[in-house]
Amino acid sequence: MKVLTVTGYKPIEMNIFKANDHKIDFIKQAIKKRLIQYVEEGLEWVLMSGQMGVELWTSEVIMELKENYDIKFGLIPPFENQDKNWPEPYQMLLEEASMFADFHQTLYKDEYKGPYQFKARDKWLIEKSDACLILLDEEFPGSTRFFLDEAKRAGQKKHYPILTITPLDLEDAVQEIQNDQFEH
């Protein structure tokens, strides 16, 4: 696997309402652990659309990993100004991500026109990647279900692994962080 698409929930879907919520640390820890594993196995690129939540937190993890790993980051928003109605902390995260991205280009050179732009985004990200990593609770797929359904359809036509970070993985991340804090 050379190219991986990462996606997952928006903050509100995880009951995260503040940019400094401690749950974000656990999510980022789980993502970091998985990305390091994949980079050590040959991953070269991580792609995402830069949506609020898991994707932008992943961009922060990638910024950190770039200090020690040869990993490239592609940011492909579905349309211009996707963040115009977002809270300011997330607008700033997207701006930061767009500045350090190795590749940054919107799919549609216009603002939001309709849900077809999100479907096109999902198809494009799946077409350009070898696999996807989704933060997902299968019992409550939320907004990830649209990407997941598209990835499953792609998997019927080609080999397209759907990798997941589950609630159990997040519990492991909580334990790891708590153990690190206890040891220090």
Image (cartoon, helix red, strand yellow):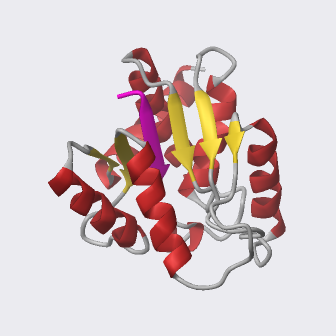
Residue 8 at least partly seen: no
Q: Quadrant of residue 79?
A: bottom right
Percent from the top left, x then y, of residue 41? 36, 18
Judge by depth and name the residue closer to the eye, 85 or 22.
85
Q: Main secondary structure of the magenta part?
A: strand
Q: Residue at x 61, y 41 (%)?
A: 74
Percent from the top left, x then y, of residue 29? 51, 37
Q: Tell me if residue 64 comes above or below residue 75 in the rendering.
A: above
Residue 172 at least partly seen: yes
Reply yes or no: does residue 20 show up in magenta.
Answer: no
Reply yes or no: does residue 2 show up in magenta.
Answer: yes
Quarter of the N terminus within the rendering: top left
Q: Is residue 162 left or right of residue 23?
A: left
Q: Residue at x 58, y 67 (%)?
A: 11
Q: Tell me if residue 51 comes above or below residue 105 in the rendering.
A: below
Percent from the top left, x then y, of residue 65? 62, 25
Residue range in magenta is: 1-7
